[in-house]
Amino acid sequence: MTTKTTTQPTANPLSKSEPQPRAALAEKLKRIDANAEQVKSNIRGLYRRECIRILHDASLPLKKSNIDNMNEDEVNDEMDFEYQNGKKSNDVEVDVNDDDDKAKDEDHLAQLSADRAAMIANMEAPATNTSTELPPPDWSKARPPKSPSEEAARRLMMAVSSSLVDLKGFDAHVARMKAPLEKEMRQIEADKLAQ
């Protein structure tokens, strides 16, 4: 006669069906927090390196351009002047008829008045969307840059915006991971108080 031996499956200490001891849960939460800090540090480091790369790339056109007879202050002054005045060296000024200017001004004033009325009506209207979440700005839709430094600034803003979105998303991911463990901890504490 042969006897069959059946082995009882051992319970997984990490299974959700059996409550875990409070110390084990606390240790898990501690490991999750430590890991989350390392990941966030890596995300920040990645975007810091990206910003340094952008700044390095922005400095290359200035070095490559043929401005041997100007020092750096003169180049910066000229770039600032062109940027502030919105002029390029190949811009041509065009003289326009005064009657056309008056008609354009009247049309422009009428448009401003209509825009102002629409904005005030919008501000006075009851709120339809009460969400506090705002989408991150899309810097790629901004106007084309006028200079390499403006392009670098736009790319830096895009990198910083992306890093903030990534960090916020990772925080939400960690919160979702920790929620069941924290709920179980609260349940253990409530059961302990009830005894």
Image: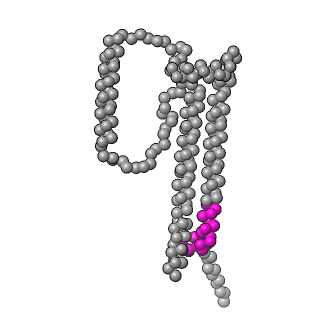
Q: Is residue 26 magenta?
A: yes
Q: x%, y% of residue 189?
A: 54, 74
Q: Residue furthest right?
A: 68
Between 16 and 69, the residue placed more toward the observer is: 69
Q: x%, y% of residue 58?
A: 63, 29
Residue at the location (32% across, 31% down)? 115
Q: Quadrant of residue 163?
A: top right
Q: Is residue 153 magenta?
A: no
Quarter of the image where the N terminus is located: bottom right
Query: Magenta stretch?
Result: 12-32
Is residue 68 at least partly visible in the picture? yes
Q: Is residue 192 above or below residue 106?
A: below
Q: Is residue 171 above or below residue 93?
A: below
Q: Quadrant of residue 182?
A: bottom right
Q: Residue furthest bottom?
A: 1
Q: x%, y% of residue 4?
A: 64, 84
Between 173 and 124, the residue placed more toward the observer is: 124
Q: Quadrant of residue 19?
A: bottom right
Q: Is residue 56 left or right of residue 128?
A: right
Q: Is residue 67 above or below residue 6?
A: above
Residue at the location (36% across, 48% down)? 129
Is residue 12 at least partly visible in the picture? no
Residue at the location (62% across, 47% down)? 43
Q: How is the image coloured?
A: one colour
Total numbered labels placed on residues in the image: 0
Residue at the location (66% across, 32% down)? 56
Q: x%, y% of residue 193?
A: 52, 78
Q: Is residue 26 above or below residue 195?
A: above
